[in-house]
Image (tube, helix red, strand yellow):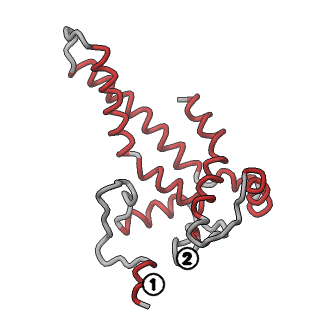
Amino acid sequence: MMARSAATLITHPFHVITLRSMVQFIGRESKYCGLCDSIVTIYREEGILGFFAGLIPRLLGDIISLWLCNSLAYLVNTYALDSGVSTMSEMKSYSQAVTGFFASMLTYPFVLVSNLMAVNNCGLAGGCPPYSPVYTSWIDCWSMLQKEGNMSRGNSLFFRKVPFGKTYCCDLRMLI
């Protein structure tokens, strides 16, 4: 758990730069061009804390996912699998993969909130209204997403849903 948390802490600034580089596509901007330029831009505009935007929900999600995955794998391997099976090691590796998938599904809201907070109000069109509301904290972001029924938005590649009564910017452009 400590190694995973340390890895998340060390790599999070690069995650923020990556997300912002992708989000600038929405507004056809070129604010983040390359690693060095992105580091200078974030430091100049937001200070050192800009590199750690969205870190807390990402850390929480990683820790919960790790504990959940390992706990479920232990329960499955200990109580559900028969130790007399000749392919026991293969079955244990499958159970680890399945529980990892299940844990990532349950902790997806933390990933979503972390990613939204990493681009929130960063000066890019995709992180500002009308594309995204400005959140005061990750808890504000979480509660607003939960209230709107958007906690699993983007979770599935094939099954997309739009909450009832919700209108998005792309819908408004089509009306004009």
Q: Given the current orientation, which residue lies at the most extreme bottom position? A: 176
Where 144 sits versus 154, above or below? below
- Compared with 149, 8 (above or below) is above
Q: Residue at x 51, y 74 (%)?
A: 131
The amino acid pointed to by label 1 is Arg
- Sooner in the amino-acid sequence: mark 2 or mark 1: 2
Q: Nearer the viewer, residue 49 or 94?
A: 94
Do the residues under discs 2 and 1 have CB atoms within 8 angstroms? Answer: no
Q: Nearer the viewer, mark 2 or mark 1?
A: 1
Q: Is residue 115 above or below residue 64?
A: below
Residue annotated with mark 1 = 173
Q: What's the residue type where badge 2 is placed?
A: Pro
Q: Where's residue 104, x and y in %?
A: 39, 42
Q: Which mark is residue 142?
A: none
Q: Which residue is under mark 2?
A: 129
How would you rate the neighbour count of disc 2 (Cα within 10 Å): few for under 14, some for 14-19, many for 20 or more? few
> Residue 157 location, x and y as percent?
35, 54
Q: Where the C terminus falls, by quadrant?
A: bottom left
> Between marks 2 and 1, how big is the CA–CA gap?
15 Å
Residue 150 location in percent, x, y? 38, 63
Q: Name the residue rendered at 62%, 59% in the picture.
A: 20
Is 76 situated above or below 8?
A: above
Point 55% across, 67% down: residue: 135
Residue situated in front as seen by the camera: 21 or 68? 21
Per the image, label 1 sits on a secondary structure element best described as helix
| Quarter of the image where one finds residue 153 | bottom left
Residue displayed at 42% across by 77% down: 168
Q: Quadrant of residue 99?
A: top left
Q: Look at the numbered disc 2 and give the secondary structure of its residue.
A: loop
